[in-house]
Every structure is written in C-alpha cells, then in structure tokens.
Image (cartoon, grey):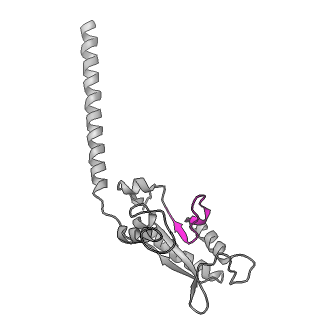
Amino acid sequence: MKTFRTVFSLLLLFIIGAFLFIWIEREIEERNERAERPLPTGLHPIVESKRDQLIAQAEEAGIDILITDGFRSVEEQNEIHAQGRSRGGNVVTYAEGGESYHNYGLAIDFALRLPDGSVVWDIERDGNENGRSDWFEVADIAKELGFEWGGDWQRFKDYPHLQMDFGLSIRQLQDGYRPEDVVAD
C-alpha cells in the first residue's frame, strides 16, 4: 500500500509538473507575441468614431471645437516632452515617448474655434452664452461618450486632453496589450 501511494504521489506530481510546464510555455509564447506587436499608426477606430460624435454633439450645443492632436508617434511625443525642458516654452506633458495614450491611438486633444476661425484654449469662454463654460460643456459631452478628461486629474490638469484607455494601463500597452484584447468586436 505504501508503494502504491508513493507511485501515485510521484505520478500526480509528474502530471501537475507537466501541466505547469505547458502553462508557463504558453505564457512565454503569448508574452513574446505581444512584445512583437507593432505600435498603432493612427487613432483606434472607436476613439475615431467617438471623436466625430464629440465634434457633432458640441456643434449641436453651439460650440465649434477643433481636434488639435490625436495619434502621436513616440518621436513626436519625445519632441513635445522636450518642450520646457531642453527646448523653450512651457512644460505641456510629463509623458515621454511610449508613456502617453496618444502613442497608442487612444487620446485626442481639443480647443475651441472662434467664429473668425482662430483657436483658443480658454476654459472660461461661454461662446454659446448659456451660462456655462464651453470647455466644460465639451468635457461633459466627451465623458458621456466614454472619454476620460484630463481636467479631472488630480496631479496635472490637462484640460485639452481626452482619452479612452479600455481598461489598459500604459505599462500594459508598453507590454503589447491592445484594446482588441479587452474589447469585443
């Protein structure tokens, strides 16, 4: 009986070890596959669609907005990050290349367009004269569409910034995860 238990225990350990080995091997293969995924080269289709809805709904509210930025390459992000540091101007981002949702096609920036065609970043302007800031009206519309607004952030208020992270952190995006991994088609 003792020999049977020993053989059974060894067999059980062997089976568990084999399953563990297969599972680890599959995890390594998936990690390697994700690491080889290229970075996006444009806005995610859902973000693009919601951007267009935002423009239309803001217009219905009497607010003309301009999308000033969308997808950014890692190189473009590094250039913007250099502003206020190694280049003149004010610091406008703390995100280096690969650390911004713009680099994954998941963020846009907006500004208000005046009737004369000029563009302003005036968060107090009430161009439609309804007693509310146009900027905050646009942010509310964006949030209803599923965007996260940089003006709600605690540390660095980024009023022009809107993003959809699809539940993915920057670290996960850097590791190769993409919204398609968490969003059903």
Q: In terms of depth relative to the viewer, which is nearer, 67 or 87? A: 87
Q: Position of residue 180 (x, y in %)?
A: 40, 60
Quarter of the image for residue 152 reads bottom right
Quarter of the image for residue 161 reads bottom right
Q: In terms of depth relative to the viewer, which is nearer, 123 or 7? A: 123
Q: Position of residue 145 (x, y in %)?
A: 57, 68
Q: In terms of depth relative to the viewer, which is nearer, 12 or 171? A: 171
Farthest top residue in view: 1
Q: Is residue 151 visible?
A: yes
Residue 116 vs 59, above or below: the answer is: below
Q: Position of residue 176 (x, y in %)?
A: 35, 56
For the image, the number of numbered tags is 0
Farthest bottom residue in view: 116
Q: Position of residue 15 (x, y in %)?
A: 26, 27
Residue at figure coordinates x 48%, y 73% from the top left: 49
Can residue 108 be found in the magenta stretch?
Answer: no
The N terminus sits in image quarter:
top left
Does 72 sit left or right of 111 as displayed?
left
Q: Which residues are magenta?
A: 148-164
Quarter of the image for residue 106 reads bottom left
Does 137 sit left or right of 88 as displayed?
right
Q: Is residue 1 visible?
A: no
Residue 125 vs 20, above or below: the answer is: below
Residue at figure coordinates x 26%, y 37% from the top left: 22
Does 10 sit left or right of 44 as displayed?
left
Residue 165 vs 120, above or below: the answer is: above
Residue 27 vs 172, above or below: the answer is: above
The C terminus sits in image quarter:
bottom left
Residue at figure coordinates x 54%, y 76% from the top left: 110
Can residue 162 be found in the magenta stretch?
Answer: yes
